[in-house]
Image (cartoon, rainbow, N blue to C red):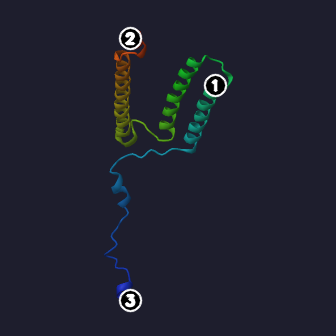
Amino acid sequence: MSASTTAEDPALHADTSNHADDHHHGIEIPHASMRDYVTGFVLSVILTAIPFALVMTGALPAQVTAVVIMGFAVVQIIVHMVYFLHMSPKAEGGWTLTSLIFTLIVVVIMLSGSVWVMSNLNANMMPQAHLESQIP
C-alpha cells in the first residue's frame, strides 16, 4: 500500500464539533446531582420501612393497613419518577409527563371497565344455590 492511501485525508474529516448538538435539537436532558439521588434513596427507604413496620407490628387492622400500603406505594412511585427517572413538566418539552398521564388514563379506564364487567357478570349469573333450591 502506498502512503497516500493510508494517510488520512483532511477533506474527509470535516469539523464535527457541533455534531453532538445536532442530535438533541433543543431538548433539555435533565441532569441530577448526587444530592438528588441520595434524597430519592432515603425517601424510598423510608417509604418502604413504614409499611413494613405496620405489617410486622400489626398496629392497624388488616384492611386499613392495605389501604395505607397502597398509599405509600403511590407516593413511592412518584418519588422514583421524580428523583430517578427525572420526570418533570420541563423534561423533553413535557412529552414524557404527557405520555405518562395518557398511559395512566388508559390503565384506569381498562381496570375500572374490567371490574365493572366482572361485577355485572357476578350479579347476573344464576347462583348454584338458587338452582338447587328449585329442584324438587
- Badge 1 crowding class, 10 Å Cα cut-off, few under 14, some 14 to 19, many 20 or more, is some
Q: Nearer the viewer, mark 3 or mark 2?
A: 2
* Residue 63 percent across, percent down from the top left: 56, 18
**Secondary structure beneath label 1:** helix
Residue 116 figure quarter: top left
In the displayed structure, would residue 80 be above or below residue 74?
below
Q: Residue furthest front?
A: 136
Badge 3 vs badge 2, beta-carbon distance below 8 Å: no
- The residue carrying mark 2 is 135
Q: Quadrant of the C terminus?
A: top left
Residue 34 x/y as whole percent: 57, 44
Amino acid type assigned to the residue bearing label 3 in the image: Ala
Crowdedness of circle 3 by 10 Å Cα count: few (<14), some, many (20+)? few
State the residue at coordinates (63%, 29%): 52
Kindly identify the amino acid type of the residue bearing the numbered disc 1. Val
Lateral position of residue 135 relative to residue 83, left or right: left
Visible residue check, residue 18:
no
Query: Which one is nearer the viewer's eye here, 34 or 84?
Result: 84
| Label 2: element kind | loop
- x, y percentage for residue 29? 42, 46
Can you give x and y, in whole percent of width and height, for residue 35 in the image? 58, 41
Task: Sort mark 2 into few (<14), some (14-19) or many (20+) by Cα contacts within 10 Å.
Answer: few
Which residue lies under the disc numbered 1? 55
- In this picture, residue 84 sits left or right of residue 12: right
Specify the quadrant of the image occupied by residue 1. Answer: bottom left
Residue 3 - label: 3
Q: Are marks 1 and 2 in contact (CB under 8 Å)?
A: no
Above or below for 86 versus 23: above
Q: CA distance from mark 3 to mark 2?
A: 102 Å
x 42%, y 36%: residue = 88
- First in residue order: circle 1 vs circle 3: 3
